[in-house]
Image (cartoon, grey):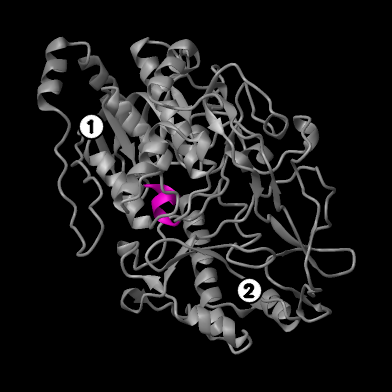
């Protein structure tokens, strides 16, 4: 039996034979077989092609069917390239269709396919301008229509990179040769895009990256690293028994001594699920008490309630009697202090963290609806809400995407910093615009000098509206990998990434990364050597905004 490398070598040797190439063209890609359609489900996602023992090859492979990955696939397909889009689970669209129902956006900075996407969303509601508030199922519908419109995009579901031997790269050219999945399936392409939230492909391809917060001194920044403490509005004891240090700490309180603002650590901002709730009595799935509810997880909330503090959920109305539930200050849906091991964790570790966060949030909402310690008006209001039957149908109403606000971040020859974002910096190779404020959620709870709980990590700073995102931040060092672009875990410091980390910006970077990959193929050059003048011209033709309007 031939080994995987032998199969790949044989496959690419055959590509030298014109007759073999002609046969491939005539045969085309595998015809997808239709997945089962769940009744009342939004339009079905593009079906997965049947797999074959041989390597599955394409012009461009995109790892991660996030919003960024889908937009990248569409851009490449529009340019005539054959595209493999790999989803690591059975869902597509990432946070845009898997939890969010309100996009974090500064509208004038968004053009190209991202703007087109929000126009298509608006059209579903018969609205004439881009709609940034929507139902997740509508985002899924638009993404599915995009992918079904391009037969040269083949979507593969539930394929995860083998974290031990998943990337085969040429040691001399630094080009990725093929990817191997956990399933044993092998995918090969000329160019690759890592559009995942975690950055697994870039990491396993030997590209430099970091996790956590740099010290301000690293890049001469002003807002990076550990943040000034966020003082709670009431005094909350950190101990299991109120004010009794001998009883031990409440879960998720960092017992380590606080470090100075601006210093480095390995913490990242907290994750949560962006829960969609509805009060339509004909569309409700009740939220039930989790079997493994840990009441100690909510002790901070009850001690704050005892002192008359009442805000524990952030939310806004979206469409059709639905709420988008997010975190609020101090204590809320963010599972603070429990996700730092996620970016570098294996799949088992990540799945465990996802489940803990889901159980925590289910328990939080159930308690707000049912616990007698919750003020009655708050209980009555939330009691009328439940998960919607018509959202995330295959997941019984629960969001399909964990909000991975920050995973790995690539370190390339150019690193975007907070100085650039805050001080109206300029670059000579912009491929899109960022504009969102520097927005970080809490990274930890800790004990202050007075012996009470304080938060740390949160910041919200207004950014330079419409700053150019450098092409160099999307490509690795040429010495590390020459046919990979990155559209989510881009080269940026922690504080700068807190502005870049929005779904519309990911879409912008996805489109631009794909346009560059197309040019790299057409011009037979390394991704780092793409002619910027050509790329700029292509992006402008694609209606991408690359300079402030």
Residue 297, disc? 2
**Which residue is at a point 11% across and 20% down the rendered structure image?**
23
| Quadrant for the N terminus in the image | top left
Q: Residue furthest right?
A: 450
**Residue 96 highlighted magenta (yes or no):** yes
* Residue 518 makes an appearance in the image: yes
Name the dominant secondary structure of the magenta segment. helix
In the picture, measured across the screen, residue 526 lies left or right of residue 249, that is: left
Whether the residues at callouts 1 and 2 have beta carbons within 8 Å, the answer is: no
Q: Quadrant of residue 63?
A: top left
Reading the image, the residue beneath label 1 is 1
Task: State the image coordinates of residue 213 (x, y, percent, origin top left).
Answer: 70, 42
In the picture, measured across the screen, residue 375 lies left or right of residue 393, that is: right
Q: Nearer the viewer, mark 1 or mark 2?
A: 2
Q: Quadrant of residue 374?
A: bottom right
Which region is colored magenta? 93-99
Question: Relative to residue 194, is residue 324 depicted above or below?
Answer: below
Q: Residue furthest bottom?
A: 372
């Amino acid at each position: 039996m031939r080994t995987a490398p032998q199969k790949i070598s044989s496959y690419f040797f055959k590509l030298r034979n014109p007759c073999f190439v002609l046969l491939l063209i005539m045969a085309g890609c595998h015809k997808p077989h239709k997945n089962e359609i769940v009744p009342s489900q939004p339009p079905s996602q593009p079906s997965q092609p049947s797999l074959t023992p041989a390597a599955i090859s394409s012009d461009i492979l995109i790892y991660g069917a996030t919003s960024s990955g889908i937009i990248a696939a569409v851009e490449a397909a529009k340019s005539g390239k054959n595209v493999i889009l790999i989803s690591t689970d059975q869902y597509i669209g990432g946070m845009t269709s898997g939890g969010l129902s309100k996009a974090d956006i500064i509208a004038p900075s968004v053009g190209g396919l991202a703007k087109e996407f929000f126009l298509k969303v608006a059209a579903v509601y018969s609205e004439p301008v881009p709609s940034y508030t929507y139902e997740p199922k509508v985002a899924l519908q638009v993404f599915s229509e995009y992918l079904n419109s391009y037969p040269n995009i083949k979507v593969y579901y539930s394929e995860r990179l083998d974290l031990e031997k998943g990337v085969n790269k040429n040691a001399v050219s630094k080009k990725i040769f093929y990817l191997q999945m956990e399933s044993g399936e092998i995918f090969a392409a000329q160019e690759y895009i890592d559009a995942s939230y975690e950055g697994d492909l870039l990491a396993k391809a030997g590209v430099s990256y970091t996790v956590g917060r740099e010290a301000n001194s690293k890049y001469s920044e002003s807002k990076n690293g550990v943040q000034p403490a966020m003082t709670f509005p009431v005094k909350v004891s950190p101990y299991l028994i109120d004010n009794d240090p001998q009883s031990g700490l409440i879960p998720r309180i960092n017992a380590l001594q606080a470090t100075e603002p601006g210093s480095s650590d390995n913490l990242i901002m907290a994750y949560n699920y962006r829960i969609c709730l509805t009060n339509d009595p004909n569309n409700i799935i009740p939220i039930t008490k989790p079997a493994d509810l840990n009441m100690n997880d909510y002790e901070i909330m009850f001690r704050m309630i005892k002192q008359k503090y009442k805000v524990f959920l952030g939310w806004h109305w979206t469409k059709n009697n639905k709420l988008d539930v997010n975190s609020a200050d101090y204590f809320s849906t963010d599972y603070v202090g429990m996700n730092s091991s996620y970016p570098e964790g294996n799949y088992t570790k990540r799945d465990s963290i996802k489940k803990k966060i889901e159980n925590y949030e289910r328990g939080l909402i159930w308690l707000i609806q049912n616990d007698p310690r919750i003020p009655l008006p708050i209980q009555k209001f939330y009691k009328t809400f439940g998960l919607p039957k018509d959202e995330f149908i295959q997941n019984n109403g629960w969001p399909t995407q964990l909000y991975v606000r920050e995973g790995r971040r690539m370190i390339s020859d150019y690193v975007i910093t907070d100085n650039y974002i805050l001080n109206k910096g300029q670059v000579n190779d912009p491929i899109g615009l960022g504009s969102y404020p520097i927005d970080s959620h809490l990274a930890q709870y800790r004990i202050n000098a007075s012996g009470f709980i304080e938060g740390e990590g949160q910041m919200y700073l207004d950014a330079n509206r419409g700053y150019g995102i450098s092409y160099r931040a999307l490509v690795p060092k040429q010495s590390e990998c020459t046919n990979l672009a990155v559209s989510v875990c881009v080269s940026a410091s922690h504080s700068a990434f807190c502005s870049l980390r929005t779904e519309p910006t990911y879409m912008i970077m996805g489109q631009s990364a794909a346009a560059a990959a197309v040019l790299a193929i057409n011009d037979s050059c390394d991704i780092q050597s793409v002619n910027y003048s050509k790329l700029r011209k292509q992006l402008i033709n694609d209606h991408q905004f690359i300079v402030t309007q």
